[in-house]
Amino acid sequence: MNIKKGLIIIIAFLLIFSLISCGEKTGGKQKLKIFHAGSLTIPFEKLEKVFEEKHPEVDILREAAGSRKCARKISELNKKADIMASADYTVIENLLIPEHADWNISFVTNEMSIMYTEKSKYGDEINENNWHEILLKDEVSVGRSDPNADPCGYRTLLVWQLADKYYKDANNLDEKLKNKDNQYIRPAEVDLLSLLETGELDYLFIYRSVAQQHHGKFVTLPDRINLKTTEYSDFYKNAKVEVSGKKPGEKITKIGAPMVYGITIPKNAENKELAKKFLLFLFSNEGIEIMENNGQPFIYPPIVTGNRDEVPEEILENITQIKQ
């Protein structure tokens, strides 16, 4: 009797296991892993939602962090990603190509701004002409991201240098702000949003798109210093910042330039076909509209760098047809 009961239990267990395994094979979703800049979080959330509605068999897994940190996950930690999207296309050029990626597509732009709230000291006075005076006040706290982890961090330092040249009364603003209390430096600028919202932090250097997406107040900076437009490319070159390179002890010099975001499919991608599908959606009219509605103007047409021959043919055909 005990033997019969044992056999029944074993058979039942095997049947349940078989059903579970079968369910996993037929009902399991394809995973698409995306590493992306923190400033792409909201538009990529929306892209994810629409893409998954169109492809219910797909589950998108996103990891947001500073762009340089995202790249180092691939290059140094050997983490696998199907797509890597950077707030600075040169991060992919400098840290991933050619060992970890073959190509890079520059696809959207942005600009620097200063975000604040009703709780921010002198928030009712600050504007594009006096912000540099207000931020230097002892009682005012200023936040920024780490330039070695996040492009927004070194772009902030570039803006400070350009402001030194633009405002006649800036008086070594770059050094003064760097010497100010540095307790509000984080790996990514979005890490400081909660401190800003609670009033612990007065002002935050952040991309204009992020300020808009979070419905925050922000100072619009003059085009000569906000790294927005190719019109002032030559002026932007007056600023430069050193950041960590590929190897410990190495340095890369970042020179002021208009903001350009980049995207690629890394060599270690586990689902390249699905990654290609996502990029085709991103470069569709619907994908472009999502990006632009979230403050990220598209580049027409997107620019390919690196080994163009390795870019999937469908993507190349698609981006060459994109028109404003």
Image: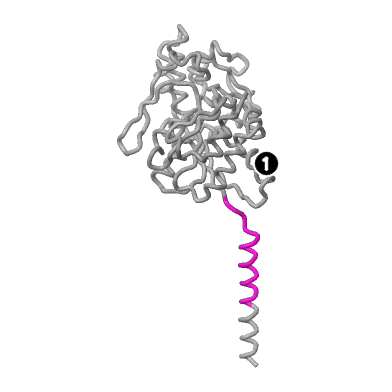
On screen, residue 257 above or below 28? above
Residue with the mark numbered 1? 50
Residue 217, x across and y down, in percent: 63, 23
Region in magenta: 13-31
- Tell whether position 58 is magenta: no
**Residue at 54% in and 13% down:** 222
Q: Is residue 184 visible?
A: no
Residue at screen point 43% across, 14% down: 234
**149 or 126: nearer the eye?**
149
Which residue is depicted at the point 58% across and 34% down? 318
Task: Look at the image and tell me whether residue 300 can be seen.
Answer: yes
Residue 17 part of the magenta-drawn span: yes
x, y (%) of residue 135? 50, 18
Q: Quadrant of the N terminus?
A: bottom right
Q: Nearer the viewer, residue 98 or 312?
A: 312
What kind of secondary structure does the magenta stretch mostly adopt?
helix
Residue 265 at x, y = what percent? 49, 42
